Image: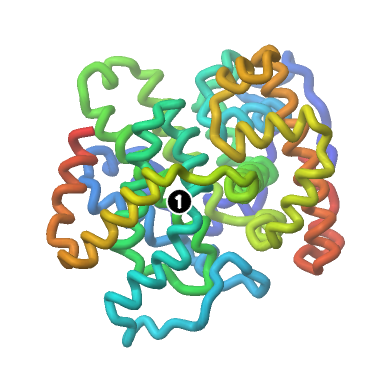
Amino acid sequence: MLCIPDNSPVIDTQLSWPALGLGPMIGTDDAESLKDGVALPAVIDQPSPHNLTGTGPTVDLDTETPAERLARFEREAVPLMSGLLAHARKRANGDEYLAFDLVQMTYEKAYRHFAQYRPGTNLRAWLHRILDNTHNNIYRSQRRQPAAISVDGLMADQESDAALALLGDFPSAEQMALESLPDDDIQTALAALSEDFRKVVELADGQGYAYKEIAEMLDIPLGTVMSRLSRARNKLRESLRDAAFERGYLDAASAQVSQP
Amino acid sequence: MMREEFSAADMPSGVIRCSEAQGALHAYVDGEFGLLANVTATQLSVHVLACSPCAAFLGQLKALQQRLACSCGCEAPAELRTRVITRITQMHVNGDMFAYLDEVRVEDF
């Protein structure tokens, strides 16, 4: 049954309906809606004490020259491209050209607004957020065309999509831990999976292939892809939760399995 | 934490349970939501907006996915890498005077 928690993400933040994509946002121009993609909620802007994703020396944003900013961007943001491409492939539904375009647009926007990124915070999450936002903007501009507007159900689905896209930005302790664990722990957790599970995860999450493509590649039914993927992810979450506990990123209470 | 289990018949029509929501969220983060026949996007977002465990679950899935995307050793093609670096260098050299072109392109997509 549904519970209405007192710490619902909607209540403890300042989400407005336009920000949820449910109203006046429709038809705003790209520059305006981009603000959502760049101005992350305060909670994610807090440097996490064990954040390993935003590395590098402290930067003085006031005195940084454009050339230095370019160099910092290439050093820190560009290496995250493979992950962004995998994410873009999912959003692009197997359209490789669209996926490339999404990645490029993401980097253009990120570079243009790089001064707004706070060094030491989670750069990867920032970039992925911009990618989602870019993709939502494309949806929105498609929706203005008559064909898409004629189907009420489709509109409702896209609005819900915009609402859900925002939810990941209010991280739980476990999410913060996932974001800051060293790559070694991720590799160890992957290696502990059985071959069948690992293959599906690598194709889906690692490389961004669609379920249908994975089903064909591995010659298994679509339903098997889906069940293996969700079971593999649950196992990964379990072992990463343990790893986070051992490293002191999670306390005992948060490390408990908190399946609703 | 365990909640009382309700059978489907006990649920008000259109309300989905956490187990259904979480199953659907796997598909949602994969951009495969269209494959699901039993849950609509409206049902899912109504549930997730009201249920903090499921909202947290969504955040964890996204975070896990982001980490795995960088951890499976697949490299972005050199072609894309070159394209992006060229474009950014161009923006740097030109002081981003062609920013308006991007806006046009996104609108025209």
Q: In which quarter of the image is residue B25?
A: top right
Q: In front: A231, or A31?
A: A231
Q: Which residue lies furthest to the front in this view?
A: B78
Q: In front: A52, or B39?
A: A52
Residue ID at (45%, 39%): A88
Dot 1 corresponds to which residue? A129
Residue ID at (35%, 32%): A97
Question: What chain is tagged by disc 1?
Answer: A
Which scheme is used to colour this image of the protein? rainbow
Q: In this view, does B70 lie to the left or right of A26?
A: right
Q: In this view, does A91 lie to the left or right of B70?
A: left
Q: Position of residue A66 (x, y in %)?
A: 27, 75
The amino acid on which the numbered mark 1 sits, given as a three-letter code, is Arg
User: Helix, strand, or loop for circle 1?
Assistant: helix
Q: In this view, does A134 lie above or below A36?
A: above
Residue ID at (61%, 56%): A171
- The quadrant of the picture occupied by the N terminus of chain A is top right
- The quadrant of the picture occupied by the C terminus of chain A is top right
